[in-house]
Amino acid sequence: MTRTRTIIALVVVVLLAGGFFLLRASSTSFAPIQPVQFDHWQHVSSTEGPTLECGFCHEHADKNAHATVPNVELCMVCHSSIKTESAEVQKLAAFAERSEQPPWRRVYWFEQDADVFFTHKPHLRAGIECSSCHGEVGQAHRVRREVDQTMGWCIDCHRSRNASVDCYTCHR
């Protein structure tokens, strides 16, 4: 009986440890399924498509705490006449017809219990490229979390750029 309990306890420990390591390993590869499969590469890097800047679709990063996700009206400015035969563009058009926004899932966010105040504004003013914090999204066909934005990662970046590491800078 004791041997059986020991084996069960060992299996539970191994499963928990494995789950923990998988969770940690996947934190930088989180790639949520989006309501419309948007290909950043086609919009940013492709020789056959437009060469849009991040701020074209993710407006207000220089003004608000969060960069906005694109609204369907902005997408339809081009896609009312471009690639209209695409199944993904047809999904966009259906959202537009219903006057709804696609329920985009964020790839990057701060945990609620982190109590972090973040704004893109000072980072943009300092000339920090979007890819510094978000990875090479412009090369991606499907966006995934490429950077594990931990407090230590942020502090290392602040120190390397001689930016403030005072707690109040990010925690208010």
Image: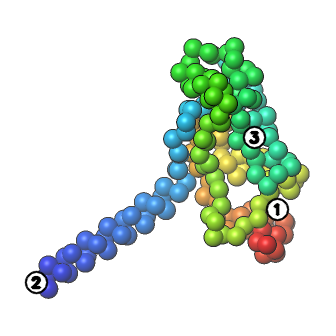
Q: Quadrant of the C terminus?
A: bottom right
**Which of 53/94 is in front?**
94
The three-letter amino acid code for the residue at tag 3 is: His
Give the residue at the far front of this rendering: 98
Asked whether residue 103 is in view, the answer is yes
Residue 132 lies, in percent from the top left, at 72, 50
- Of the image marks 2 and 3, the number of the one nearer the N terminus: 2
Whether residue 15 is situated above or below residue 99 in the rendered picture:
below
Q: Secondary structure at mark 3?
A: loop
Q: Secondary structure at mark 2?
A: loop
The residue shown at (70%, 70%) is 115
The answer for how far apart the CA atoms under marks 1 and 3 are is: 25 Å
**Which of 52/157 is in front?**
52
- Of the image marks 1 and 3, the number of the one nearer the N terminus: 3
The three-letter amino acid code for the residue at tag 1 is: Arg
Q: Nearer the viewer, mark 1 or mark 3?
A: 3
The answer for how far apart the CA atoms under marks 2 and 3 are is: 61 Å
Q: Residues within 10 Å of mark 3 (few under 14, many from 20)?
A: some
Name the residue beneath numbered marker 1.
161
Q: Residues within 10 Å of mark 2 (few under 14, many from 20)?
A: few
Give the residue at the far right of this rendering: 125
Q: Quadrant of the N terminus?
A: bottom left
The residue shown at (62%, 48%) is 106
Name the residue beneath numbered marker 2.
1
The residue shown at (75%, 40%) is 58
Q: Identify the colour scheme used.
A: rainbow
Name the residue beneath numbered marker 3.
58
